[in-house]
Image (cartoon, helix red, strand yellow):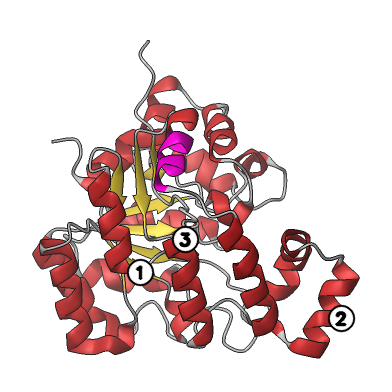
Amino acid sequence: MPAPLIIDFECDTPTREAVEDTVRLIKSGRGFDKEGYAQQMAPGWAAQIGMSLDEFNAAKAEHGLTWLALKLCEVDMTRAMSHQAVIDMLDTAGVQYACIGNAGRRASNEDVAKFAAEHPDRLIPWFRIWGDEGEGGVAALERGVREWGCRGFEISCYRENRYINDPAYRPFLAKCVELGIPVRITVGLHLLTDRPYDYAHPKYLDEIAVEFPTLKIVAALTGWPWVAETCAIASRHQNIFIDFACKRVKQLLAPGAGYEALIYYGARTLQDRIIFASGWGTLMVPLHQLVAETDALPLTDSVRAKWLGGNAARVLGLDH
């Protein structure tokens, strides 16, 4: 049996351009240098900087999280991946296509598009902009699609202090329908402790799906701890898909982990709407390992092929 098509729907590309844009975000106050994520990520961040956890916490108390985040960027810059190294990584993992520009750390829209243009047969660029950009942002999205070749639009509402169904996103969603591109919306619990916990609750997707029935909507990151609700809403709307980015795949099967509905319905009534997405950089787990763990899930060959790439191909229009 031939190997299935594999598409990574959220592929980190920690290039120099991505690090540069991360610095810009941090300095503008829109980075992840905030309480909540800092507590969870502290051990990994400390190790990357070369500190013990005690040293990291002491530096945080003395200098603040922004200082530490910029220090982490300095380290990231020294080991930034070349463009060819990203392609080599895809080859090693057996990934035919990778969506870029929609991961936690990413390059600017223009740099993402330029990188994708170097490898149009492998890389699929996504566009991301803040909802408060208004009409100018909608025009920028259209330019990104028509002139730069972007193939999807990314929303992380909790980072903007908004709910998924915030009116600010309506013009962007309407433009996605007009342009024929999917929207990917992060759903689930976020860790920023200075704002409501339920900004990205999957229940708000229902309103979007009702208003935009022809828009392909990807519920990113499964909606944990409301995974069953994500699956229930997807069962109501044929235009809602679910990806499991930034989740350690082998742990989806762990008792009590909260992904029972994803595994059960994803192998049955939702088998045509579950999408592999690695988020390997967030997890700090090699892409090839996450692909292998997905391949090892207790699924039939036909369902596994849909999860690994067949469903994503339909969302992205690669199955034509």
Please provide the residue range marked out in magenta: 83-90
Q: Which of disc 2 and disc 1 is earlier in sequence?
A: 2
Q: CA distance from mark 3 to mark 1?
A: 11 Å
Give the CA distance from mark 1 to mark 2: 33 Å
Rendering coords of residue 50 (x, y %)? 79, 62
Give the labeled residue for mark 3: 16
| Residue type indicated by callout 3 | Arg
Asked if 83 appears above or below 36 in the picture, the reply is above
> Label 2 vs label 3: CA separation?
29 Å
Residue 290, quarter of picture:
top right
- The residue beneath circle 2 is 58
Q: Which quadrant is home to the N terminus?
A: top left
Q: Secondary structure at mark 2?
A: helix
**Mark 1: which amino acid?**
Ser
Q: Is residue 85 magenta?
A: yes
Would you call the spot at circle 1 few (<14 residues within 10 Å), some (14-19), or many (20 or more)? many
**Badge 2 vs badge 3, beta-carbon distance below 8 Å:** no
Quadrant of the rendered image containing residue 320: top left
Q: Residue at x 58, y 72 (%)?
A: 190
Q: Earlier in the sequence, mark 2 or mark 3?
A: 3
* Residue shown at 19% from the left, 76% from the top: 140
Left or right side of 215 for 252: right
Q: How many discs mark residues in the rendered view?
A: 3
* Tag nearer the camera, 3 or 1: 3
Give the x, y percent position of residue 38.
Answer: 70, 74
Tell me the tag on residue 108.
1
